[in-house]
Amino acid sequence: MPKRNIIWFRRDLRISDHPALLEAIQTSDEIIALFILDSKLIQHSGSKRLAYLAASLRALDESLNNKLHVMVGEQVEVLQELMLRYGATSVHISTEYEPYGARRDERVEAAGIPLVRTGSPYAVAPGRVVKASDATPYKVYTPFYRAWRVHGWRKPAAKPKTINAITPKDTDRNFPDWKLPQGLSITPAGEKAALARWKIFQKNGLNNYNEGRNLAGIDGTSKLSAHLKWGEIHPRTLLAELGEDKDHDTFRKEIAWREFYADVLFNNPHTEKEYYAPRFAQMRYDAPGEKFEAWKSGKTGYPFVDAAMRQIVQEGWMHNRTRMVVASFLVKDLHLEWQLGADFFMEHLVDFDVASNAHGWQWTAGSGTDASPYYRVFNPIEQGKRFDADGAYTRKYVPELAHLSAGTIHEPWLHPDGYTHGYSQPIVDHATERLESLARLHEIKADKPQDPRA
DNA sequence: GGGACCTTTGT
DNA sequence: CAAAGGTCC
């Protein structure tokens, strides 16, 4: 009887630089390539992310010469059935660290499935970078970054020369047919698309990254987030080709932010949903109502905010600069809790990553690690003028403002024709709400005596 | 333990 | 150039 291993793909949908796949191959005669559709994750994913996953599974299957099993059902049952049927002795995985995935794997293991963990979605696994002084985790990014670099990471793993995989039965080829709703568009999925995008970014964006990454209207960011989220490319593959100049270092720092937030969530799993700084739970917030609806539908009357909100709904992706702008607007202009925005992002983002999302939001809200200082409130108009100076980004997503030029598109109230194409009036006055936000923050200042009833 | 330091700013 | 307060070494 040949020795057989299962390779259970989850968020590592690639065959290059894949240590767990290599390990599964090297310790067996044949592998069983498997993906299990997880009803819980499907429930929490919007149509765009599901369409992306469907495409990514097709791409992975192609790389595996159509040998991918796509199964529906409870993980333990599916794994037990396949192990029995094929006489497989172990299940190889890339280690997962975020709360849901880590708990799932523990549960599977507790049910008697022999999991073999090799590698992770990170260059340095969460929990590995700690302070030299007392071996506790970092809470501030920059010292983490320095220690992360000193820690270092392995070279990319080799692409397997041959993959000897069992041919699935037809009934085990349950590829989902999740379609993208009409009128929407998402980025191409799969390992080939990821590697192609990386090449394009290296050629066109990387060498001006320090400046270009902030400009919403140009293709200045890597746009690798969805590929990284689904593991179609490993961060090590990117890091291996970076140099030491300013632009390359800035990009390396963005990769390190992803690793920092994975580490913070690993060490503080409750911060997926709760305030990292607990006193922010005591702040006065407004209840979500009409203004929240306006934010979600891109009708706040603030052009840069509305452009970004329409971008995420149409494309499942939002420029990083505008992620901060719309987050600041939700929390500090509308006085709503960050979790409302984070949940909306979870529904729409193709690249949704629980750690980066929760802590990106908390940074803006002021409640996170190394958070934005409380007095720092983004000005949505000034941000638009600075980072979408010619108005191209806003014009693209807000057709009601397309007739306005660079000079007035971020302030339609300055133009006599500003509202002639149906654009919304501002739902709040930024200057007023900024002061309101500062007042509410003052109420929870650390040096204020706590309410004894609290 | 004291001093340097801290992604992404506003006016 | 002003704006806390915590973290790091």
Image (spheres, coloured by chain):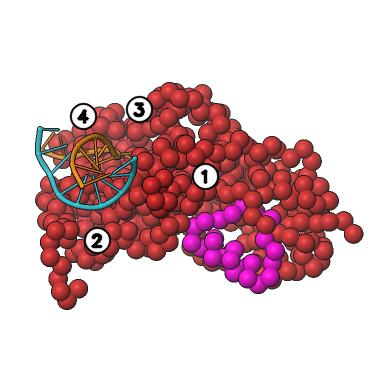
Chain colours: A red, B orange, C cyan
Query: In the rendered image, is residue A108 in sight?
Result: yes
Asked if labels 4 and 2 share a chain, the reply is yes
Is residue A294 covered in magenta?
A: no
Q: Mark 1 points at which residue?
A: A124
Q: Which residue is drawn at 59% across and 32% down?
A: A196
Q: How far apart are marks 4 and 2 (CA)?
A: 38 Å
- The residue carrying mark 4 is A407
Comparing A349 with A17, the one in front is: A17
Residue A231 in the image, given as x and y percentages of width and height: 58, 46
Indicate the quadrant containing the C terminus of chain A: top left, top right, bottom left or bottom right: bottom left
The residue wearing badge 2 is A280
Magenta part of the chain: A92-115
Is residue A386 toward the left or the right of residue A99 in the image?
A: left
Quadrant where the N terminus of chain A is found in the figure: bottom right
Chain bearing tag 1 is: A
Q: Nearer the viewer, mark 3 or mark 2?
A: 2
Return the mark for residue A211: 3
